[in-house]
Amino acid sequence: MKKICLIFRVHLSPTLRPYRFFEIGDHAPYYEEETLAADILQEAQTCLQPISQLLLRQIQSNREKIRVAIFLSGMTAALLEKYAPGLTPVFRQLASTGCVEFLSGTYSWSLASLYHPAAFQRQIADHRQSMQELTGAGTSGIFLNTGLIYNHQIGRQLRHAGMEGALLEGNKQLLGWKSPDALYADSRIPGMKLFLNNPDLNKDFLHLLTGSQKIQRPGLKGSVQDEILSAGETDQQVNLFVPFEILRQPEGHSSGNLHLLEYFLYKAGQSSGIQYCTPSDLLHSGVIPEALPTDLYLLPEEKNNFLMYEPGNELQQEALTKLYEMTGKMELIADPEVWQEWNFLQSAVHPGHMATNCPDGTHSGTNNPFPSPFDAFIIYMNILNDFNLKLEQLAKK
Amino acid sequence: MFGWEFPPHISGGLGTACQGLARGLSGIPDIQLTFVVPKKWGDETGECCRLIGANQVILQQPLFPGSTGPGQAQQISLPSGIIPYQTPEQFWAEKSKRQAKQVRFVEITGEGTVNFSGTYSESLFSEIHNYALVAEQLAREESFDLVHAHDWLTFPAGIAAARIKGKPLVVHVHATEFDRSGGEINPQVYAVEREGMEYATRVITVSQLTRHTVIDHYGIHPSKVITIHNAVEQLSENQKACLKKGLPGKIVSFIGRVTLQKGPEYFVEMAQLILQHTNDVRFVMAGSGDRLPAVVEQVARLGISDHFHFTGFLSPEEVHKLLSISDVFVMPSVSEPFGIVPLEAMRFGVPVIVSRQSGVSEIIRYAIKKDFWDTHGMADAIMGLLNYPALSGLLSKKGREESGSRSWDQTAEEVYNHYRQLSYHFHSL
């Protein structure tokens, strides 16, 4: 029986307003409220709503057969609560089917795991709480870190937070000649299981879902769909990651590429040699995982749509260092609004806009709302400085 | 190759670009380059090619060398239809004779040559006209395969030389009248530019921005207009030596002619926005031009003279000195066909802010780009650069690499490829 693990990811992050240097100290809003409201509503209507409804429909009609995992950031939950409250019940419904596993992760889809252990723990806890409020079911013990970043130090922190497994990128650096399509365990951290994706196959799968381009990969016998859906050897498992935003409906199209996802789910539902499952199902299926050493600092090698962050650029490092230097000051703050701002500033989308070499070959990335990574950096740093002043003033009170 | 300027006698980027290209081309074994300037001063750094001054070309040999008085001068009929004269009387005497329709007159010196100031004086149009006549004469004597003319001043000369031997003409557009005038087009200049572009077999523009101007405003067929970006000279070791700053505080510099085209007023506005909040920044405007008095007045009126300095026109060495003490370089040009100075600044590791209305912004990545009117945005970018060392460090390091990767050899190679398409001579090799 072949096991397919479909993992969806949703993260909404507000776009920062061009915050001027001379506004530092004014404590002006960091976002344009109206734009933000419109953006979130649009995202809800063109992306979140149709996909979640589709999943719910498929799960209800193929009872027990379709099981998927979803990661939804706490920020997303907060933004939906505020700007698209009509959408939140569907997640509760999805949770109540018992066929959807809500994964653990960071509240802000943040990079705290690389910079600040305490902030990381806080992010995990905040995320768990916000999921509890949104779905009523809480999160599982499987962790999806931002950008699939993992190493044994992060693994140790995750174990400390009570996690049983993590999802990561199945790159060659880590695997050598081993197959990504199996369950592994971290050789250095007892009780920590590892779920890997197969980057090539995953990329092709996303292309398949979006219908964006013909797939011609050496070694591919039939179509990607055939490869995924063909009944495989015993105990083979395939982890496929799907960021929600790639399935966004083009404006003016009521159906669009969601048909492809629906067809895929239906097709798999019909097949007898295929079983959908969630990471937790795999974990408790009795498969004995092979040990995998994770001494190398593991960062995603392949840049596909799923990953938004590529470390190394000085601007990103500086911004994140300055951000997490404020962690200590945050501990003195009780004001929930300031906490919300702090959480929003941690979103990995911000440093993503400072990338100078983007996967799509452009300088600043086609989805960058700022004219250049340098503008993105200046604006972010202006805001950080303003936020820092705000914290100092609050601390004095 | 015809060009109006050649270093060190330059007023802006044109001469620098001509020299750079000439040096680059001289590295290609297939090319023998003759560069014609209106006036040869004798101190040109032109070891790369044969440099001829139009003022040295003899149109008429004196019959008796040494006796140069008007009385002894003899009229020799040239097949060119050019009649040289030395005095007004001679001019009128010849003029009153029955002459063929196409005959042109040119005033010569006792040595039989034509005088050129080589600058942008009031008699510019007559100089351009005379330069073309000399070019024609020179073309008769010389043998060549292709003519390459830089900017409108030399277009008539380029046409004359190309026509007389039936050789292809390449015109190189470094700037158009639309860039220089800011909207008030001089029809005479426009006509000269257009004629040159129309006659030319190939029009080379220094940026896509200029290419569009040439196609849209001059009606030139897109198929013959190509873009070849400029480059920047590499630094020699002693030029890299850094200067000690004499002034406290950070220095933001503007280097360029103080004319409408370069947007100096926006630089002042931006300076004022910054100086309202901080006293720690100094602004330096290097260059001269017709807007300078107005800009000085503007600075005085805003009351920021104590932090805003004017240097006047700077020699290349002085520009290098200024760049080596600058913390940020800004080019807020309203319309800039290319703009070499930002590349020079990057070569010195100075972070740059350039206007999006410039050709150079097409080829550089490690620079901050703003619209020229967005003075708030520019002020913000400056404060960002001065306050966040990670950003200025990155731009300095990567900018230096980036500017170093674009050499004149590359530009020359691209130009040469087009030569090969135009002239069979280059095919034979």
Image (spheres, coloured by chain):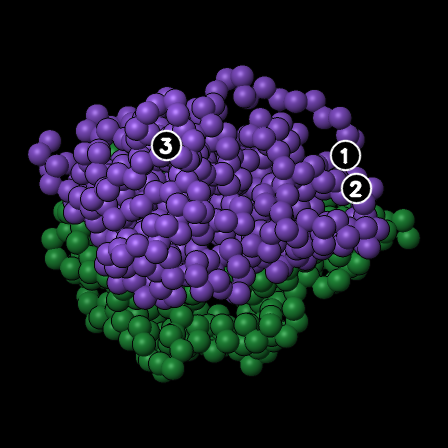
Chain colours: A green, B purple
Dot 3 or dot 1: first in sequence order is 3
Considering the numbered disc 3 on the image, is that residue within a helix, a strand or a loop? loop
* Callouts 1 and 2 in the same chain: yes
Q: Quadrant of the N terminus of chain A?
A: bottom left
Q: Which of B66 and B195 is in front in this view?
A: B66
Question: Which residue: 51% across, 55% down?
Answer: B180
Amino acid under label 2? His
Q: Distance between the residues labelled 1 and 2?
A: 10 Å
Q: How many callouts does the rendering have?
A: 3
Discs 1, 2 touching: Cβ within 8 Å: yes
Dot 2 or dot 3: first in sequence order is 3
Q: Name the outermost residue toward the top.
A: B238
Q: Mark 1 points at which residue?
A: B249
Q: Name the residue under label 2.
A: B307
Residue B108 seen anywhere in this rendered image of the structure: yes
- Report the mark closest to the observer, 3 or 1: 3
Chain to which mark 1 belongs: B
* Vertical position of residue B305 compared to residue B400: above or below: below
Chain to which mark 3 belongs: B
The numbered dot on residue B72 is 3
Amino acid under label 3? Gln
Tell me residue B392's x, y (percent): 61, 38
Q: Nearer the viewer, residue A82 or B304?
A: B304
Q: How far apart are marks 2 and 3 (CA)?
A: 64 Å
* Vertical position of residue A16 compared to residue B66: above or below: below
